[in-house]
Amino acid sequence: MNAATFKRLVLEGELRQAVASGQLRAYYQPKVRLADSVLVGAEALIRWLHPERGTISPNEFIPIAESSDLIVVLGNWMLETVCRQLSDWKQSGLILLPVAVNLAARHFHSLALADQLQQLLENYHLPPNGLELELTESTLLKGGTQPETTLRAIERLGIKLAVDDFGTGYSNLAYLKHLPLAALKIDQSFVRGLDDDANDRTLAATIIALGHQMDLLVVAEGVETEGQRRILLDQGCDIAQGFYFDQPMSAEAFAARWLKPANPLRPIAEGKP
Ligand code: C2E
Ligand code: MG
Ligand code: MG
């Protein structure tokens, strides 16, 4: 066994224990409407608070988890944690906005995913538009023989679906166009160059036009500067997420910085993000 394989096995074992011993956290990063920076939702991002190594990035452990059923364990943990959090916020009288959870291909191998999601919403007394799912193009392609059926069942529940990291895969548009998607997220690699790379500006404008042609909301991720925000706004992008607006943060910090008391005259979480 080589050193890399050994390291992966150790990490996988530690990660299984991390779930049981409460070392995982859901962090929340705001999504805002580009025109006026009003909060329209959040993305939940997993964090591993390792007792010796500090916070470990999901980029380090998600790929390892994806090679086994562990990714399903983590995804289920995130779904449950986010629903419990939404329910807590609702009970504290805070306004509810859609929170997106990232799901990997293996989740879509199970035809029971839609039933599982429906059960979660019922258990926590949440409206279906409290939850959104983000999936990448490669997740869609690897999601088994029936991802389309599963996605349709999820859409019927009222849970919105977004394609993550758009533009980094093969972008099989003929396939994507048949899926019940609500939003497209422009990958941050295109956003990064917006200020000084004309090619990236052209690419972003093209993706935004394409998304709108497909009747999708377009979200830009990784927005870090006022210049990037301005260009995306001029190009007609709808929603943005990135350090320019705020970092991913703990549930407590997110509630304190971003969530407002619900207006009793206006029912919560009614509109599109
Ligand atoms: P993603 O879903 O595309 O999430 C966006 C990533 O960009 C997050 O990294 C976020 O912290 C980071 N980000 C946000 N704004 C900015 C910015 O302005 N500049 C830069 N440079 N980065 C920004 P994070 O949290 O490290 O997550 C990395 C990836 O790990 C995620 O990419 C997602 O693919 C995966 N991931 C995270 N949480 C989960 C999870 O619960 N389940 C699954 N299956 N994957 C997850
Ligand atoms: Mg995502
Ligand atoms: Mg992304």
Image: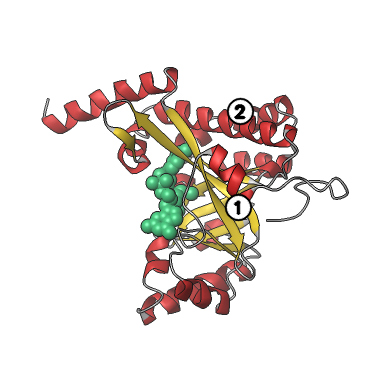
Figure coloring? secondary structure
Foreground pick, 243 / 75? 243
Residue to which mark 1 is pinned: 179
Q: Residue at x 68, y 56 (%)?
A: 273
The amino acid at mark 1 is Leu
Q: Secondary structure at mark 2?
A: loop
x and y percent of residue 223 in the render? 46, 64
Disc 1 from disc 2: Cα separation: 18 Å
x and y percent of residue 149 in the render? 62, 41
Using the rendered image of the protein, determine whether residue 138 is visible from the camera's viewpoint: no
Which of the two discs, 1 and 2, labels the residue nearer the N terminus? 2
The amino acid at mark 2 is Ala
Q: Residue at x 57, y 70 (%)?
A: 237
Residue to which mark 2 is pinned: 112
Tell me if mark 2 has few (under 14), some (14-19) or many (20+) residues whose alpha carbon lies within 10 angstroms of its own: few
x and y percent of residue 104 in the render? 46, 39
Foreground pick, 75 / 42? 42
Q: Residue at x 63, y 29 (%)?
A: 84
x and y percent of residue 261 in the render? 74, 45
Instruction: Report how many numbered discs are placed on residues in the image.
Output: 2
- Disc 1 Cβ-to-ligand 2 distance below 8 Å: no
Residue at the extreme right: 265
Picture disc at residue 192: none
Foreground pick, 166 / 265? 265
